[in-house]
Image (tube, coloured by chain):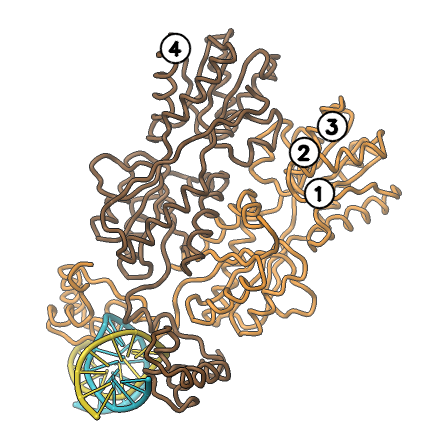
Chain colours: A brown, B orange, C cyan, D yellow
DNA sequence: TTGAAAGCGCTAACAC
DNA sequence: GTGTTAGCGCTTTCAA
């Protein structure tokens, strides 16, 4: 574009020292006389020198960039993910953590087999130091492909069994138990659940945890309807539930959007929430308090989890941590209006 | 990590040709005999060679990465942006367009003066070929800083006057006119509006456009309450409006979330939507049809706009386009239940 | 403490 | 058509 950007060479000439010396002060290595440091610093100032990352990377093999991969499958998959508040929270957590380390996330989408290969390809070109994988799918092959290629990887949510990779996860079952306990404590006895896509491990764990907790309290047979984590699907699931069990008095939905969908449908059918039917959501995302009724929900600290995920990756990259590590987070019940 | 990744040199040796020849087939340059091409291709296969991006960049000066900068100011600013469906739509549009060009977005957040400088710094290190700026603020200085540094830049939304930079924008006033026309056609005459932060040019344009359209139809004096684009703020604004003008029969909200907030408040106050008060939103984001009432709204083709923004940047980067260009999009009225 | 020099892996003239 | 060669801008031994 303009006339060539200043290089180390230019600064060196300007300061009357060697390239090596300039490099040393730029990288904060000691062994440089204070006065020379000062001279160099001024020369940098005058020339407006910025180190060239690519050149530096060529020798250090560190790009200070990590890939944030949204993995999953299907038509319009990406659009759905990006519309979900969950995605924004993850990005937020990742960015916050990375910034403190002067690293940056590049967004990659892996929605098909070929896209997955492209991601692996991209990463093996040394464009990023590692990968953060957020998957919307069971048995996502991406993490395995990545680790097989020896690319530092950390995943959000428990990976498929047998895969030796670091991850962060929520104690899903505990969250479900919290929801069950709250519903029970309210006096609900005819309790149903709107679960998430069973293909998703997290959704399965919430469902199982919920069933287990209820069974332990003597409530057997829990009617289940599956949704897709959207408001619509929550309403549809609620409708199915109501058709077969008109006397339901408590519902646990596997995320907040479905919980809202359930609330809406319930109200349309003339049921009051929470008086006639209590509804508990999951996530405590921004939508929990955006629409009425404000949701009683199980909080998942997504930003924190995403931050920890990024932190783990950073440690793997710099070699501070070598063994695959799992970090679990505790869910928390947030009581509001819906139950 | 492992033993050194294979380089061009390795492939060349394996294939029994020179580095240059391998480079040519890798980059799809002609002037290579078909049989040699085949030999090289097989050698690449055998060695598992992946070109090293940094090395390539060092000579081509193209990183095939662009920065997607979320710019704005304030505490918790980032969290708010990331929670907004708008952000996801932008990312989606950008990623789709970039992928086709084998480029990738790296997410940067510029929420303070120092963060802005870091962004400029980052880009002057040649880490990305250009910047996509999405700002949530009036007179954002970032775009100016970027263009001053000769970094190819395209912004989402009209930049401050006098700044010679490419941008994409919606014909905001047309959108407001659509909303006004619809409300008028329904027979509304006591019409108010919940506008967005006046600091935002887009919000101001919607407001002005709305006023103008109404004035042209002989409806003067439009009560205005300002919100912050959140559901809450929409409800609060509606409440203020109602306090002063209890007989309002039509409302235009500057985005869908505020429209939902207004609908909720209206219903809480015993008003039926749309029978007693008609509400028109703006954006046609995913929330428009997620909650009842489904919103009548002005569609803003965010994904398309974001895609065009990325496309413009790509052209600027590859030199196909040199003059700053503005591309405008036409809004569209989507009639549903709320008006 | 500083400088000289050897690459890092690749592309692009230029020569053959 | 293909190979040779000279860098791109930086870090990092190794000597001095």
Q: Is residue B205 left or right of residue B99?
A: right
Q: Secondary structure at mark 3?
A: helix
Q: Position of residue B328 (x, y in %)?
A: 63, 57
Left or right: residue A23 versus residue B321 is left
- Circle 1 marks a residue in which chain? B
User: In the picture, residue A66 is in which quadrant?
Assistant: bottom left
Which residue, given by chain and number where applicable, does mark 1 sit on? B227
Give the alpha-carbon distance from disc 1 to disc 4, as whole Å: 47 Å
Question: Mark 1 or mark 3, which has the lower sequence index?
Answer: 1
Q: Earlier along the polypeptide chain: callout 2 or callout 3?
A: 2
Using the numbered discs, state the Cα–Cα distance from disc 1 to disc 3 in whole angstroms: 16 Å
A202 above or below A4?
Answer: above
**In the rendering, which numbered label is found on residue A217?**
4
Q: CA distance from mark 3 to mark 4?
A: 42 Å
Q: Which mark is residue B266?
A: 3
Q: CA distance from mark 4 to mark 2?
A: 39 Å
Q: Nearer the viewer, residue A149 or A178?
A: A178
Q: Residues within 10 Å of mark 3 (few under 14, many from 20)?
A: many
Disc with the residue nearer the chain's start (1 vs 2): 1
Q: Which residue is mark 2?
A: B261
Q: What is the secondary structure assignment of the residue under circle 2? A: helix
Pick the residue in front: A112 or B240. Answer: B240
Tag 1 and tag 2, C-beta contact below 8 Å: yes
């Amino acid at each position: 574009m303009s006339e060539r950007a200043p290089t180390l060479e230019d600064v060196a000439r300007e300061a009357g020292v060697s390239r090596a010396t300039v490099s040393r002060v730029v990288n904060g290595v000691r062994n440089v006389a204070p006065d020379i440091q000062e001279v160099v610093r001024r020369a940098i100032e005058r020339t407006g020198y910025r180190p060239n990352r690519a050149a530096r990377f060529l020798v250090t093999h560190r790009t200070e960039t990590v890939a944030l991969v949204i993995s999953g499958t299907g038509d319009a998959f990406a659009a759905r993910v990006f519309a979900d508040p969950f995605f924004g929270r993850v990005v937020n957590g990742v960015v916050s953590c990375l910034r403190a380390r002067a690293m940056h996330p590049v967004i990659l989408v892996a929605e098909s087999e070929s896209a997955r290969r492209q991601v692996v390809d991209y990463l093996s070109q040394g464009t990023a130091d590692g990968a953060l994988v957020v998957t919307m799918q069971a048995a996502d092959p991406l993490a395995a492909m990545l680790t097989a290629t020896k690319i530092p990887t950390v995943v959000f949510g428990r990976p498929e069994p047998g895969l030796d990779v670091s991850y962060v996860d929520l104690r899903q079952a505990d969250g479900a138990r919290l929801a069950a306990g709250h519903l029970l404590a309210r006096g609900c006895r005819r309790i149903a659940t709107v679960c998430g896509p069973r293909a998703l491990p997290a959704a399965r764990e919430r469902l199982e945890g919920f069933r287990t907790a209820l069974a332990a309290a003597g409530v057997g047979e829990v009617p289940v309807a599956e949704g897709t984590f959207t408001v619509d699907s929550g309403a549809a699931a609620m409708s199915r539930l109501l058709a077969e069990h008109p006397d339901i008095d408590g519902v646990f939905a596997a995320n907040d959007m479905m919980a809202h969908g359930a609330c809406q449908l319930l109200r349309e059918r003339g049921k009051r929430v929470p008086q006639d039917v209590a509804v508990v959501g999951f996530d405590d995302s921004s939508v929990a308090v955006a629409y009425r009724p404000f949701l009683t929900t199980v909080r998942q600290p997504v930003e924190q989890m995403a931050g920890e995920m990024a932190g783990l990756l950073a440690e793997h990259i710099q070699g501070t941590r070598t063994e695959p590590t799992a970090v679990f987070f505790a869910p928390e019940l947030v009581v509001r209006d819906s139950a």
